[in-house]
Image (cartoon, rainbow, N blue to C red):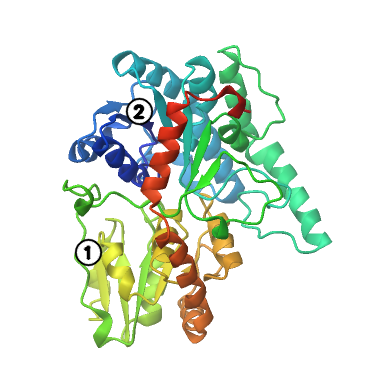
Amino acid sequence: MKILLASQAIAGHFNPLTGIGVRLRDEGHEVGWYTGSTLAPKLDQLGIPHYPFNRAVEHTADNLNELYPRRARLKGPLAIRFDGERIFASNVSNFFEDIRDVHERFPFDGVVLDNTMFIQRLVAVVLGKPVVSFVPIGNMETDPLVPPMFFGFAPARTPAHRILHAGARLVSDQFVTKPARVSYVRQLQNYGLQTPKEAAILDETYRWSHAVIQTGTASLDFPRRHTNPKVHYVGALLPHRAGDSGRAPVAAPMAAAPTAAGEYRRRVVVTQGTVDNRDPAKLMIPTIEAFKDTDTQVIVATGGVGSDELRRRYPQPNVVVEDYIDFAQVFPGTDVFVTNGGFGGVLLALSHGVPLVTAGLNEGKNDVNARVEYAGVGVNLKTETPSAAAIRSAVDTVLGDPSWRARAQAMAEQFEADDSVGAAVEVIKATVAAGGTPGTLA
């Protein structure tokens, strides 16, 4: 088979697909990858041909605020509204026309699409190709039992909660996601495709995909009234690692695992991810402040921003600051993971049975953190800027009750039970081999 992978040029959207790309290639399939030019070196390491963005604007974790200076001043629903329209929906036609050009050079049999590209219907209907969507965050499909996205709600438990959720859903439909939906509908009209104006844009990727690879487990999702048979939970899709097929790792150079925590009573790992890491005072600094000069080892992964300054400011021996760390090596000796709620990091921690303390609201992280809290595998501080005292108290809460780790370890056993990459690859092969059954769309 000839299979095209297509993703945003954002690490959290690209990295989880790397294991799938390598597995497909190693099984003898022809694989190409459509994504931004900044990822060309990583694709070269993987040995997968790269088809770069041509018309599409390349959005990365590093250039968003440079491309859109006013974005840095937006918070909450305003930030989601802006990102939905400018970063995601505005590229729909560009993505599709680029992929149509790629097909001339690489006549693929099927496409694995990052679901945030929103071109599933165009590829499936206009090009007539089987489409498998990949969802790098929690399940985004609407359901009567699932609270509206972007508000950080847990499922409603009382009539008052249900009224609140109904109001929030109205705000989401009529304000937060409306510009993105209007842009999406207008662009599809240029191809003769009519979309009901009231249709939820987040549901479009589920409706117009022949199959959906959903990262995570159903146990980390909220209960649903309706089960979509196209959605396949595959567990934690982690970045391809060097030992998986003898090639170099995709990730940026990482520090080896820091000194084992044996000389300390416990270990806490903290990160703000690779997007919202410009201001270490949000989470990294208060976590260090909470535990500096104690018998708790604090390992800080900065994502390559401000590491030297943090090392100068915190020379304490129990504080380790690195641009990047190999989480797979560090997490087995970690007691608590403090994070703003990046879904990949959350899944990686849980795959090692590590409970969490979460503190993040933007980029949909409040929804991830609500799921963490609902599943009972971590404490959700429900803020972007927790105090050192709040972090210390949350860590003590998690470590003071063994049930937190027990629930995290139970979830880890679910991850271990499956070959996540293998499960995803089987979905892709079956879907492409079937040629995209028309009855599975919409």
Query: Up-down: is 167 above or below 117?
Result: below
Looking at the image, residue 173 sits to the left or right of residue 301; the answer is right
Q: Which mark is residue 308?
A: 1
Q: Residue at x 33, y 13 (%)?
A: 104
Camera-near label (2 vs 1) is 2
Q: Amino acid at mark 2?
A: Ile
Q: Is residue 423 left or right of residue 209?
A: left
Sort mark 2 into few (<14), some (14-19) or many (20+) by Cα contacts within 10 Å.
many
Quarter of the image for the N terminus: give it: top left
Label placed on residue 3: 2
Q: Residue 87: tell me if it is visible.
A: no
Tell me what residue is drawn at x 35 percent, y 45 percent.
11
In the rendered view, would you say 27 is above or below 19? Answer: above
Classify residue 428 by image quadrant: top left
Q: Residue at x 80, y 63 (%)?
A: 158
- Position of 200 with respect to 434 (left or right) is right
Q: Is residue 284 visible?
A: yes
Q: Return the x and y of residue 276 as percentages of the image width and height.
A: 41, 54
* Cα distance between the residues tagged 2 and 1: 42 Å
Give the image quarter of residue 342.
bottom left
The quadrant holding residue 101 is: top left
Q: Amino acid at mark 1?
A: Asp
Residue 98 percent coordinates (x, y): 38, 20
| Helix, strand or loop at mark 2 | strand
Among the two numbered marks 2 and 1 on one chain, the one whose residue lies closer to the N terminus: 2
Q: Quadrant of the C terminus?
A: top right
* Image coords of residue 250 (percent x, y): 24, 47
